[in-house]
């Protein structure tokens, strides 16, 4: 059996919301390489575990599931975003370090 990766998915770069970023995901790592079929050019694999993707509300639930089922796992902690608190009115401050240009 292959090892599983437990992680919290990153925010979709094309969306501004944070949907589906609160849950933790357990997915299996690739054990066999993908192959290109000569007739159609599609990519395929004989490893069916690549299709399994489980979602949990907390990291502890995902770890408990992997432990209970005897699945080797590794946990990837998410990097916290460092957001600057800028507002629209900050563009017009008198003490700006760079001059206002159009």
Image: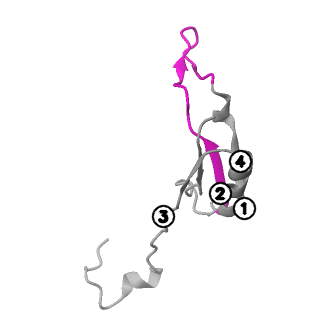
Mark pair 3, 1: CA separation: 18 Å
Q: Are marks 2 and 1 in contact (CB under 8 Å)?
A: yes
What is the CA distance from the residue labelled 1 to the residue labelled 4? Answer: 10 Å
* Left or right: 27 as drawn, with respect to 86: right
User: Dot 1, how many residues are within 10 Å of its Cα: few (below 14), some (14-19), or many (20+)?
Assistant: few
Q: Secondary structure at mark 2?
A: strand
Query: Would you name the residue on which mark 4 appears?
Result: 54
Q: Nearer the viewer, residue 37 or 84?
A: 37
Camera-side residue of 13 and 52: 52
In the picture, residue 15 is in which quadrant? Answer: bottom right
58 sits to left or right of 102: right
Q: Position of residue 13 (x, y in %)?
A: 52, 54
Specify the quadrant of the image occupied by residue 49: top right
Reading the image, the residue beneath label 3 is 79
Residue matched to label 1: 57
Kindly indicate the quadrant of the structure image that contains residue 96: bottom left
> Which residue has dot 2 on it?
24
* Quarter occupied by the C terminus: bottom left
Residue 23 belongs to magenta span: yes
The residue drawn where x is 57% and y is 8% is 39
**Residue at the location (31% across, 91% down)?**
94
């Amino acid at each position: 059996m292959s090892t599983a990766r437990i992680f919290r998915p990153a925010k979709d770069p094309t969306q501004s919301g944070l949907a589906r970023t609160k849950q933790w995901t357990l997915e299996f790592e690739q054990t066999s390489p993908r192959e290109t079929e000569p007739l159609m050019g599609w990519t395929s694999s004989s490893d069916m575990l690549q299709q399994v993707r489980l979602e949990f509300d907390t990291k502890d639930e995902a770890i408990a599931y992997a432990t209970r089922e005897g699945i080797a796992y590794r946990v990837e902690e998410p990097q916290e975003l460092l957001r600057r608190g800028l507002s629209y009115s900050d563009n017009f401050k008198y003490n700006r370090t760079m001059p206002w240009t159009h």
